[in-house]
Every structure is written in C-alpha cells, then in structure tokens.
C-alpha cells in the first residue's frame, strides 16, 4: 500500500481528487481544488446533482471505463452523515492507494463503524486500511443546499478540523502521518484555518458550539407556531437572532443529533438544571434571594458570551454601537457605508433592524470605542440621523 507522500517545501503537488457527493460542500470543494490546479473527479448517487456540479466547473464526472480515471490519489467523501461510514469503507476498498477523507459533522461514530467493518472477518476492509483514513470537518455552510448553492469562497478563514483516526481503547493514532498531512493541506488549499483534535474531543466541542445552539433555536421557534399575529408583529432582532438557524433542514439534523447523541445529552442535562433553577425562582421571584438568582443567571450568560472569540478569531473586544436611521429604499446601505469609508473608520460589525409601522430602517454599526464620537459627528454632518447607544 503506497500512501500519498506529503508535498515537500520545494515542490507543490496537485494530486487527483475524487469527490463522492456533490452537494453544497462537495461541489464547493471541487470548485476550489480545480481552480488550484487539481484534477477533480465527481461522483454522486444523483445523476442530476453530479451533472450540475460538473456544469458549474467543480470537476468532471468519474468514468470507470476511462483508463486511470478510477485511480484518484485523494478521495473526499461528502455524503450525508448516515451514509458516510459506508462510503468511506467503500472508498478505502475501491482505491487502495488513496488517502480517504470525510467531511461529516460528527466523527466518533463514523470511526466506530469503520472499526466494526475492519473487525468483520468477512469484510474486505482491514484495520491497516485505516492508515489511509482521516476524518475532517469544515465548519462552513449556507442556508441553501445542493450544488447550485456552491461557492468557492465558502471555506475562506473558516475552521477545518482534522481528526486522525485513533484506537478508542489505547489512544494509538491509526491514521498515517502522511494522510494527516494531506488532510490539513487540503484545508489550507481551500483557504480554511486548520485545527487538529481527536474524534471524541471534536464531537464534544461541536455538541456545545453547534448542536446546542441549533436545539435552542428550534425549541424557541417552536413556541411561535401558535403565537398571535399581534405578538409576532412586535418581534425585533432579538427574536430573529435567536431563531435564525431554526430554519435548518430537519432530515440533516436527525442524522447529526442521532450520531452525536451522548455529548449532546450531557450538555442538555446541564441546561435542564439551569432551566429548572430559573423556573423555581420565577415561581416566586420576590422570595428572598430570587432577584439575586435571576441576576446571577444573566451574569453567567454575560461571562459565557465574553469568551466567544471576536473578529477573525481574535480575543473578544468591546465595541460600541451607533445607529444610523435610513429610508427604506434602494441604495441607502451603500450610501451609509460609503460615507463611513470617507471618514476612515472600520466597521467591525453591522446589523439592520426595521421600525415596525414606519418606512425606515436602522443600521447598527459596531466600531472601536475611540472612533465612535468622531464617526457620529461626521455622519451627522453628512446629513444622516445618528443615535448613540
């Protein structure tokens, strides 16, 4: 078995890559790697999906009858989570010289299923084959799905987690170093920021920072199903922020949560304790200690959000907000940002809110504290109505 060697510093290799699965992520990977000089082959159970991916330039369709076309050096499995382990196993058997990566959002269950395959005396897959396997997870996506939604810039500056296969009992790394090197190199060529952790630690991490927010958003949004229209008319950005990701694909999340159930349940136990504690307090909020307990719960949230990395993954910074009132008509946002650029102030973050019942919008600009007053004065001079928070 010849593993693909890592590229030396003096030479840059562009191995042939087969992408099995031409949805949003698989097609986006193909667009970037093909532009980077790789020969990219595409395969998908859906003839329509793979044809669209080929038509938009993500690669060419795999033709098994074509000499050499069935011998990629790297295989990237971009299948749904429930099909990933089977697809990885098939790729390891079908392409015995290739490094095989998967990009599923959970890792421990896939590795467990692969080890089960390798332990089956009747299976063509062996434990030694797992030297060529590395799990990866691009922390990227869009609200749209399918190959037509693919974008080459999807992975730029986003985390790309590399999870070498490890023996769950001994902790011994099963993935060969060459395979791990290529897993990270693919992430870098996509423009991502590469991180490495073991599969169990990865799943615990995404349970907290990805799966719990999805559950919370869906649970809050579910309370809105029978809400009076008059109540929903009062909704502002707070509700929209909390429920934005509740519009996710139920079928995909059934697979994700099922494959990562144990870490998610552990977090939900803690969340349940907090909810029960708050319920108990709010049943008699004026009781001794009740006000302090509410304040403590909110303060604990303050402390948690302060730990979320800020812009470009840097430590969180304190920004201040100024709000610019704009007419609800085309060109207003561009005009605001053009005037901000004239002042020479960098916008660290921006959000919009509309005023209920009025044809105006509010553009909230987050800037460094030392620049707020300067920007407010200049924007007022330019004729904008500015409100300081």
Image (cartoon, rainbow, N blue to C red):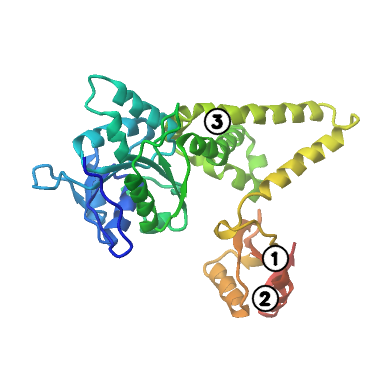
Can the viewer see residue 385? yes
Q: CA distance from mark 2 to mark 1?
A: 10 Å
Q: Which residue is mark 2?
A: 379
Q: Nearer the viewer, mark 1 or mark 3?
A: 3
Around disc 3, counting alpha carbons within 10 Å, would you say few (fewer than 14), some (14 to 19), or many (20 or more)? many
Residue 264 is tagged as: 3
Q: Is residue 125 left or right of residue 237?
A: left
Q: Is residue 245 left or right of residue 388?
A: left
Q: CA distance from mark 1 to mark 3?
A: 38 Å
Classify 278 as above or below 298. Answer: above
C-beta proximity under 8 Å, tags 2 and 1: yes
Residue 322 is tagged as: 1
- Which of the 4 image quadrants contains residue 341? bottom right
Q: Helix, strand or loop at disc 3?
A: helix
**Residue displayed at 58% across by 63% down:** 328
**Residue displayed at 31% across by 38% down:** 131
**Residue displayed at 30% across by 53% down:** 6
| Image coordinates for residue 359, horizontal then vertical, percent | 62, 61
Mark 1 vs 3, N-terminal side: 3
Around disc 1, counting alpha carbons within 10 Å, would you say few (fewer than 14), some (14 to 19), or many (20 or more)? many
Mark 2 vs 1, N-terminal side: 1
């Amino acid at each position: 078995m010849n593993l693909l060697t890592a590229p030396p510093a003096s030479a840059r290799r562009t191995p042939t890559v087969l992408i099995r699965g031409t949805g949003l992520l698989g097609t986006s990977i193909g667009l970037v790697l093909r532009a980077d000089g790789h020969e990219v082959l595409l395969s998908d159970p859906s003839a329509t999906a793979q044809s669209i991916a080929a038509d938009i330039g993500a690669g060419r369709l795999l033709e098994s009858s074509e000499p050499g076309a069935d011998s990629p050096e790297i295989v990237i499995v971009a299948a749904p989570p429930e099909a990933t382990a089977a697809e990885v196993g098939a790729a390891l058997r079908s392409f015995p010289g290739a490094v095989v990566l998967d990009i599923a959002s959970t890792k421990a269950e896939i590795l467990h299923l692969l080890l089960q395959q390798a332990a089956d005396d009747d299976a063509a897959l062996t434990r030694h084959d797992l030297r060529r396997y590395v799990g990866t997870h691009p922390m990227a996506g869009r609200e749209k799905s399918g190959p037509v939604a693919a974008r080459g810039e999807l992975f730029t500056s986003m985390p790309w987690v590399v999870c070498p296969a490890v023996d769950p009992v001994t902790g011994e790394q099963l993935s060969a170093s060459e395979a791990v090197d290529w897993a990270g190199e693919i992430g870098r060529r996509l423009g991502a920021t590469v991180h490495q952790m073991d599969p169990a630690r990865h799943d615990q991490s995404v349970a907290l920072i990805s799966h719990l927010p999805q559950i919370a958003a869906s649970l809050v949004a579910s309370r809105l199903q029978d809400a009076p229209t008059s109540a929903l008319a009062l909704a502002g950005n707070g509700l929209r922020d909390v429920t934005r990701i509740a519009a996710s694909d139920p079928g995909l999340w059934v697979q994700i949560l099922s494959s990562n159930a144990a870490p998610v349940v552990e977090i939900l136990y803690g969340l349940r304790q907090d909810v029960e504690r708050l319920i108990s307090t709010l049943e008699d909020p004026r009781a001794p200690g009740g006000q302090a307990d509410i304040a403590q719960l909110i303060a604990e949230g303050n402390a948690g959000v302060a730990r979320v990395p800020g812009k470009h993954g840097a430590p969180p910074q304190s920004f201040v907000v100024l709000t610019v009132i704009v007419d609800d008509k085309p060109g207003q946002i561009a005009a605001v940002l053009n005037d901000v650029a004239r002042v020479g102030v960098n916008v660290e973050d921006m959000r919009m809110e509309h005023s209920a019942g009025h044809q105006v919008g509010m553009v909230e600009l987050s800037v460094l504290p030392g620049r707020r007053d300067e920007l407010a004065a200049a924007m007022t001079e330019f004729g904008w109505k500015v409100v300081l928070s």
